[in-house]
Amino acid sequence: MRTVQSFIYLFIFFSCSQNDEIMSYSGNIMTLGVQLTAPTPDSTKYHNDLIHPCVRYIPEGFAGHKWWMVATPYYKGNNKIENPILFCGDSREGELPPLIWTETCVVEDTPSVGYNADGNIYYDGTKLWVLWHENGTESCTANNAARCTFGVSTIDGVNFTNKRLFTTVESATEDNEMCPTVIMFNGKLRLYACYHQFTPVRIPKGLAIWDINNNDLDNNSFKLTKIVNPIYPSGFDFWHFDLFEFKEKLYCVVSNEVADEILLGYSDDGENFQFYSTPLLSTSVCSASYLYKPSAMVLNDIFYLWYPVRTPNGNRLYMSEMNFNEMNFSGK
């Protein structure tokens, strides 16, 4: 589902998802950051290539580390190696995020048919959960679905439970569980996902919200409860994203499918999202390409942004940082 058809989006007006203003800006909020070191296992298979990072900070530590990340290789566009790989890292002085990450394991290896994608991390206070999105795999077929979201948990970052089914999509023409992202907000555990129609034309249809009984990942699955329509600049197709909470707001960082922009948005209620028009980063300004799915958080008033960048040797992860109180957005 990664075929780039960006020219279509220039002519599609999806009134529920976009505002009436044409996006215009002369700069970015942030600048291109530092390249991280995150070697993959089996370099002949994965080539140290990584996209779609999901970074989580656990202040009290988990399995001896405070920083955890899942990311997926996508070397030369090969979705057969798009497997969720778990990494850990240690804080630098002053709880600064790591610049060096260590792989702990491949959470789910290449299926016999179809492919994995879109890893996500959630820490429940005891166990670390890793979720991912399967497309056309044998596990999807076994559940009478075209696509499924599965997850596993671990107490040591190395050994995992058997995978559990969390969501299913039967349709082959649309997907409302892309880029599954699990987060607790206002006491409610939810899974958020991009909702996209693929045929007869490609249309971003909003943000799908899935709820789960009793906030219980061990015993329950997510059920689709509503579709919301983020407000973002026209010409931008809402694609892959991550969420974080800060000062009682739920923030969202998102890239479009062509992956040449990253936007920041916020919500007071966890449902209605408003995005700033000025990108955090854009290819047209910083020259970096394939910014495929960011992850972000605020720690000690510093906003950290993780994202991939295409290099001559493949996709590599980068991190930018900026004082959150000094971020100057033009327009909402």
Image (cartoon, rainbow, N blue to C red):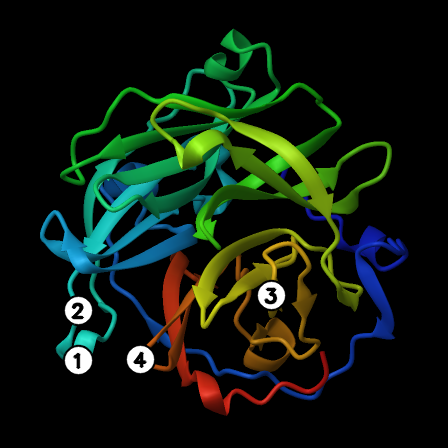
- Identify which residue is drawn at 59% across, 56% down: 270
Residue 246, compared with residue 167, is above or below; it is below
Which mark, by number, is residue 176?
Answer: none
Q: What residue type is labelled 1?
A: Gly
x, y percent for residue 209? 62, 42
Q: Which quadrant, please, contains the C terminus?
A: bottom right
In the picture of the structure, the residue carrying the numbered disc 1 is 94
Q: Rounded to the nearest whole Å, what is the CA distance between mark 2 and mark 1?
A: 8 Å
The image quadrant that residue 80 belongs to is: top left
Residue 5, compared with residue 267, is above or below; it is above
Tell me the SS state at disc 3: loop
Task: Please name whichever residue, 256 or 73, is drawn nearer the observer in this view of the structure.
Answer: 256
The image quadrant that residue 303 belongs to is: bottom left
Q: Which of marks 4 and 1 is in front?
A: 4
Q: Are marks 4 and 1 in contact (CB under 8 Å)?
A: yes
In the picture of the structure, the residue carrying the numbered disc 4 is 300
Residue, far left: 64
Q: What residue type is labelled 3?
A: Asp
Q: Do the residues labelled 2 and 1 touch (CB within 8 Å)?
A: yes
In the picture of the structure, the residue carrying the numbered disc 3 is 268
Q: Bin the neighbour count of mark 3 within 10 Å (Cα to Cα): few under 14, some 14-19, many 20 and up.
A: few
In the picture of the structure, the residue carrying the numbered disc 2 is 91
- Identify which residue is drawn at 50% across, 8% down: 142
Query: Sequence-wise, which precedes: disc 1 or disc 3?
Result: 1
Query: Sequence-wise, which precedes: disc 3 or disc 2?
Result: 2
- Identify which residue is drawn at 62% across, 19% down: 146
Q: Which of marks 2 and 4 is in front?
A: 4
